[in-house]
Image (spheres, coloured by chain):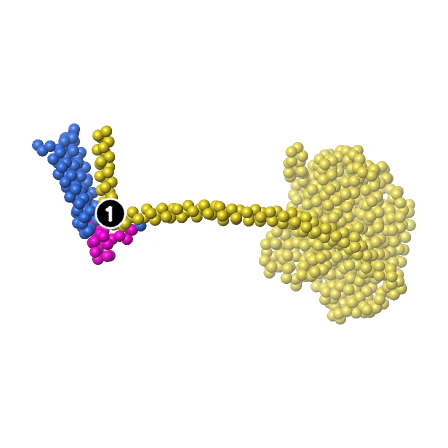
Amino acid sequence: MQETISFTPQLTASPITGILWLIPAVPMVASGVIALLKQPKRRTASTLAIGSLSFSLLLSLIAFGHVVRDWTLGIATRETVNFTWIQVGAANVDLGWVLDPLSAVMMVMVALVGLLIFIYSIEYMKHDENFTRFFCFMSLFAGAMLGVAIANSMLLLFMCWELVGLTSYLLIGFWYQKPAAAAAAKKAFLTTRIGDVFFLLGIVWLFAQTGTLLFYNGGAGSLEAGALGGLLAQPAAWGLTAAGAIGLLIFAGAAGKSGQLPLHVWLPDAMEGPTPVSALIHAATMVAAGVYLIARVYPLMQAGALAGGTTTALTVVTWVGASTAVFAALIAVAQNDIKRILAYSTISQLGYMMAGLGMGGVAVGMFHLITHAFFKALLFLGAGSVIHGCHEEQDIRRMGGLKADMPLTFATYGIGMLALCGFPLLFSGFWSKDGILEAAMHWSVAKTPLYMLVFGALLTAFYMTRQVGYVFFGFNRGSKDAHESPEVMTVPLVVLAFFAMALGLIGTPAWPWFRGFLDGRAVGFDWHGFIEPGLLALMATSTVVVFVGIGLAWRLYGDQSPKPTEPDVLEAAAPLPWGWLRDRLYVDELYGVTVIVFYGWWARVAEWLDRRVWGGAVSGVAWAFGLWAQLNRFLDNNWVDGGFDKSCDELASGGGLLARVQTGRVQTYLRLLALAVVALALMLIWSSRA
Amino acid sequence: MTPLAGYLLVAALLFSIGLAGALTRRNAILVLIGIELMLNAANLNLIAFWRYGPHPEALTGMMFAIFSIAVAAAEAAVGLGLVIQIHRHAHTTDLDQMNRMKG
């Protein structure tokens, strides 16, 4: 075992932490500016997006460098900047950001992968008329995702979390003219919302219990010892502590975002979006946000565990993760859409990450997250390149023989595929997956997840080889004039391919730098890492598994090139289970007859209530008012109007009477005047007499 | 010196003559002349009451009379102007035919 030396914590904020907020803010501002651009301003839009993300990458690298330097000096960086957002009575709602190894690793990954995908998109989206809108959403996504990475507050994380959910929705439905895309966007939004409701409940509960939503706040944060102690002392239902229950609620949110088992159905449909979107959001970063979230709140998930033990929350995470890994890998075997295979593969790999978090800790899960981000982005961009080269064809049965037409895409795709399969020694996927398997081997609760994950690895190697065999080998069964993509698209592929291989170096058992970096302890280079008990045997086993998977698939699919109309080899051998897998094990149908039917029924009940009960009440009130109005009209016509008419008539006739005095003759008036004067004079005389 | 009643009698006579003229004549101009006579009867009264009043040295009645004459002159001008306009419009100065203000 490596010697464990805890580094001294570093809490004062350095200058780079002070300006850390610029990392998400700059792409968000760029997104706002792009939103105001006119459609033909394509160059400005892409320049703004790429420029702002490059800036974020630069800052992220500086921050990362800062953390690494501290680490070499034996300091575990955890610098935070917190501020009060809202003050409600005695309670404060605080926001803030944190710079620690976890956030540093995450933001460098997001910015780097994002930047490569942005560059790739310039070419891929070249002919789309909504080019500026695309970059607006992508920039907003990048900003929000970087916000998730640096958040030091559950609330800030949740806001950014919802923002990435929103951009995911917008980008899946980017081609909203297609009904399938619009439906997929809606499905993604609603499915992840189910998880988010639980997540929000967890946040509220956490706030109610600890009075703060900050993760780290110099001892007063919700993930620090004081708050966790309080949470552990608080019992919740079914023998869980409050910490465990909140952890499970948060995990529900993470499961929604990361496509874990009950809520995975949206991710394959999300492939309706443009391929760079699939690569960035639905493979490399956003779906990994759930894994990152669990890694972030790991102290909460782990609270109360004895040494070497585990907690209920982590056990649940493990089982869900392992089941997802096998389940999705099974379905991936029988898919024919190039992107759908990768989508199920993503779900499966996310299951690996969750299982890795549950059994091995933050570093194990995060290492797979990082390596997966690179090779899955590579695979998606490679798939995009293939789709682009084959004139928007996505069915792998209508491809074939592309290794000659698209050599660079083939080479990089091959690297990505081998990394995903976990091909030994050279590829990053091998080391990260091996870390998870090793953690499963040492897990104290059960050995089943280990077997499940090994079986998953076999399936992974199988379906990836099947896909590569269909796409790149044999003869071309689709359009004849497939062409290699231009350099703007292939250069990001090459860069990603480099990382897909090189990243393995920082996580080998001999030099587990990544694990030491995240856990805050020193590591040295030591060959003896390999000869820990059981490890060599495990590596040998996984190697054998990978070779068996690749070999089997190669025997069945390599260079065979069946016609598109022919049934698959396995379908011919076992049509029934193949059909189950091809139809995605009927999960969508299951939801169709349970959740959807229930909601449909409920909607009908609500409609009936609306029409009959509420609508009836409203109509009743309206009818009563109508009656009242009729009564008023009657009174008006017969009483009020009559009175008015009568008085008007009287006035008119009185006027006529008086009008007779007005003869129009001046002398008549004068005569009247004279008479009046005489009368007045007589009155005066009379009064003086009296 | 003639007693006050003498002046008042003359003024009353003048007023009555004016009133009779204004009431009986049909010609608008003659009616105006009658009105002028009545005004002058009033002026005569003003002067008489001033001279036989408690402060004959104060010239107040004279001032009233002068103002009254000036106003009467203006009034006569307006009245004559109206009569001329009516004559132009209706080619008559007969007041009995001018009854368009009848209610």
Quadrant the N terminus of chain A occupies: top right
Examine the rendering and report whether any part of residue A345 can be seen. Answer: no
Q: For the image shown, how many numbered marks are present on the structure?
A: 1
* Chain for numbered disc 1: A
Q: Is residue A608 above or below residue A338?
A: above
Nearest the viewer among A154 and A683 is: A683
Examine the rendering and report whether any part of residue A224 can be seen. Answer: yes
Question: Could you say which chain is coloured yellow in the image?
Answer: A
List x then y, in percent, for residue A507.
Answer: 81, 48
Q: Which amino acid, mark 1?
A: Thr
Nearest the viewer among A241 and B34 is: B34
Question: Does B97 lie within the magenta span?
Answer: yes
Question: Could you say which chain is coloured blue in the image?
Answer: B
List x then y, in percent, for residue A324.
Answer: 82, 51
Quadrant the C terminus of chain A occupies: top left
Which residue corresponds to mark 1?
A: A668
List x then y, in percent, for residue A113.
Answer: 72, 53
Residue farthest along the left direction in this orientation: B1
* Left or right for A91, reference A307: left
Nearest the viewer among B50 and A9 is: B50
> Residue at 61% across / 54% down in the picture?
A35
